[in-house]
Amino acid sequence: MKTNPDISVQTLRISAATYRTCRGAFCPLCEKPVRLFGFSEAADLIKTDAREIETLAGNGKLHRLHNIHGRVMICAESLFCLFQARPTQNLNIHALPGGAKV
């Protein structure tokens, strides 16, 4: 196998520390600064529970990032992309407050 000595490889490093705050960070998967949500806050936004958020993050469907304090949080961009791609769910009459009848 021949090698070409004229080819050089350059690495571009992006400092993610400049984007990291308590509510935001640079997401390397989205390749941009994003807002961060806690697991329970993310669950409230898409009307589910924190356990499902943990499962989705474990499966790689949601991006997990550390904020400046080292707390693991969810990338808002991945959360909204997942929410938009989800199929519409049927209305469950038992989910209405007080079991209201329509």
Image: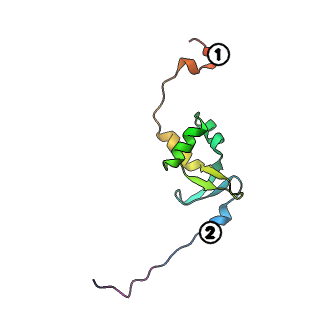
Q: CA distance from mark 1 to mark 2?
A: 51 Å
Which image quadrant: the C terminus?
top right
Q: Which quadrant: the N terminus? A: bottom left
- At mark 1, the secondary structure is helix
x 48%, y 24%: residue: 90
Choose the circle earlier in sequence order: 1 or 2: 2
Instruction: Magenta stretch: give its range.
Output: 3-9
Q: In the figure, 9 relative to 14: above or below?
A: below
Q: Residues within 10 Å of mark 2 (few under 14, many from 20)?
A: few
Secondary structure at numbered mark 2: loop
Residue 7 found in image quarter: bottom left
Q: Amino acid at mark 2?
A: Ser
In the picture, the disc for residue 15 is 2
Q: Position of residue 58 (x, y in %)?
A: 52, 48
Kindly identify which residue carries mark 1: 98
Outermost residue toward the left in this view? 1
Question: Does 57 appear in magenta?
Answer: no
Q: Residues within 10 Å of mark 1 (few under 14, many from 20)?
A: few
